[in-house]
Amino acid sequence: MENKKNELILDGIIQELRRGTITLAVLSQLKQPQYGYSLIENMNAKGFDVEANTLYPLLRRLEKQEILESFWDTDGVKPRKYYRMSEFGAEVYAKICAAWNDLNKTLNNLMDEEK
């Protein structure tokens, strides 16, 4: 029983960590326009599992914040909404990357102290 409880605690902590990185992960994949499903497939294939019920609200929020722009492609069999980084989004992405690298370096230093 104790192991199940510990697994649930660990899963929750890992989920919190992933939640904090999903915006960075999504932006890293939107240098070229993509539609939602292709983004899910590409990220999952690269080992960053994301579900539609997580991704689509994030895409809408980032669009509302003007970090992303969208456009519809109606030429195919099925209309698709494509997303791409705006100019502002590219600036935000660069700053998030710098913050991530700084944080990662600091965390690695903290974890290396243990050794």
Image: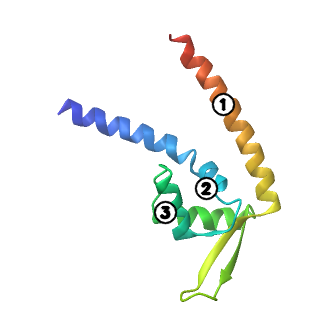
CA–CA distance in space, label 3 to label 2: 12 Å
CA–CA distance in space, label 2 to label 1: 19 Å
Q: Residues within 10 Å of mark 2 (few under 14, many from 20)?
A: some
The quadrant holding residue 38 is: bottom right
The quadrant holding residue 95 is: top right
Residue type pointed to by label 3: Glu
- Could you tell me residue 15's position as x and y percent? 44, 44
Q: Which mark is residue 41?
A: 3
- Could you tell me residue 112's position as x and y percent? 56, 15
Please give the name of the residue rendered at 61% of the width and 65% of the height, measured from the top-left corner. Answer: 59
Q: Is residue 28 above or below residue 17?
A: below
Task: Please name which of the two marks, 3 or 2, marks the residue nearer to the observer.
Answer: 3
CA–CA distance in space, label 1 to label 3: 28 Å
Q: Is residue 111 found left or right of 61 in the rendered image?
A: left
Task: Please name which of the two marks, 1 or 3, marks the residue nearer to the observer.
Answer: 3
Please give the name of the residue rendered at 67% of the width and 60% of the height, measured from the top-left corner. Answer: 30
Residue holding disc 2: 26
Q: Is residue 66 found left or right of 112 in the rendered image?
A: right
Please give the name of the residue rendered at 46% of the width and 65% of the height, measured from the top-left corner. Answer: 53
Q: Which of the marked residues, 1 or 3, is nearer the chain's N terminus?
A: 3
Residue type pointed to by label 2: Val
Q: How many numbered badges does the structure rendering display?
A: 3
Residue holding disc 1: 103
Residue type pointed to by label 1: Leu
Task: Please name which of the two marks, 2 or 1, marks the residue nearer to the observer.
Answer: 2
- Could you tell me residue 80's position as x and y percent? 59, 80
